[in-house]
Image (cartoon, rainbow, N blue to C red):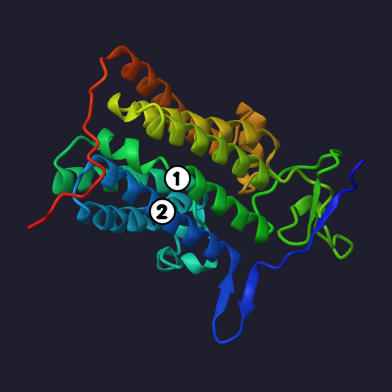
Amino acid sequence: MLDFITWTASPEIYSGFVTVRWYGLMFAIGFWFGYEVVWREFRHEGVPESWVSKLFIYVIVATVVGARLGHVIFYDWAYYSHHLADIPKIWEGGLASHGGVLGIMFAIWLYSKLVTKRSMLWTFDRVVVPVGVVAALIRIGNLFNHEIYGGPTDLPWGFRFIENIPQYLAGAEAQFSVPSHPTQIYEALAYLITFAVVMWLYWKRNEQERPGLIFGVFMLGIFGARFLVEFVKNVQEPWEVEMRAMCGMDMGQLLSIPFIALGVWLIVRALRRPRQPLQYPNKFPEEK
């Protein structure tokens, strides 16, 4: 039987003239991977290559701004409403994935109007394919940061973290957390499974010919997993303790419900409509 794992990894890869952190590296690798996958999708379908770089400018800006505002509004408005100058200080921490998704949705709306002149679902069905890997890498970054982990467990793979100890363990004697659920790993695995499914749907089943289906499966997989894992995760803000006591859910679960419902609706809608066959020239067109 495995013993509990004492997680002592440093959040920093290198600290000197500049500080390089695992979280930032995972974020960068994720966006690079996403770019490569979408580039291959767009070439596969013969749409302009310039659409790829434009898409990622929209997505990167929207992810950072949306995730930051999501944390500010959904989790800590009581503080930031009196410290507006601190809102842009993302280097101090505080990003919310639900806010990032809302930001991306707005960016895709603009991108569809100004660049592709196609429906938002056309873009969503392609851009979400690599996002499971991006999300998994970000959760691995959280693991290195000793953050967003779960409550106590006696399971053999429980992790003892050395930073961000919950208040009920704080004190001179609390050098480590009690063995806790490594919820970062739970979510990362769920996101990788979602990635595998949507990759299969796109490349093997051509389900992009059913507008909204791939996007719907992605939303159901990502936010369904998030909803379930939250049951064993520590709350991110102290006021969520009372919220859990009142309704049995925390803010992460409450915010996930609309995305889960959207995913189910998109899947049902797509399966009820006829397939729309596409051409796959597997090359970019010449652009003037």
Give the mark nearest the N terminus, 2 or 1.
2
Name which residue lies at 49% across and 60% down: 29
Circle 2 or circle 1, nearest the eye: 1
Residue 184 location (% of width, % of height):
65, 47
**Mark identifier at residue 69:** 2
Q: Residue at x 83, y 52 (%)?
A: 5
Residue 163 located left or right of residue 153: left
Q: What crowding class fits label 1: few (fewer than 14 Cα within 10 Å), some (14-19), or many (20 or more)?
A: many
- Mark 2 and mark 1 in contact? Answer it, CB < 8 Å: no
Query: Does residue 234 show up?
Result: no
| Vertical relation: 190 (above or below) 167 | above
- In this view, 222 is above or below 5: above
The correct choice, above or below, for 113 with respect to 194 in the image is below
**Residue 265, labelled with which disc?**
none
- Neighbor class of circle 2 (other Cα within 10 Å; few <14, some 14-19, many 20+) is many
Residue 271 seen from this side? yes
Q: Position of residue 78 (x, y in %)?
A: 50, 53
Residue 284 placement, left or right of 206: left
Between the residue at mark 2 and the residue at mark 1, the CA separation in whole angstroms equals 20 Å
Which residue position is annotated with label 1?
131
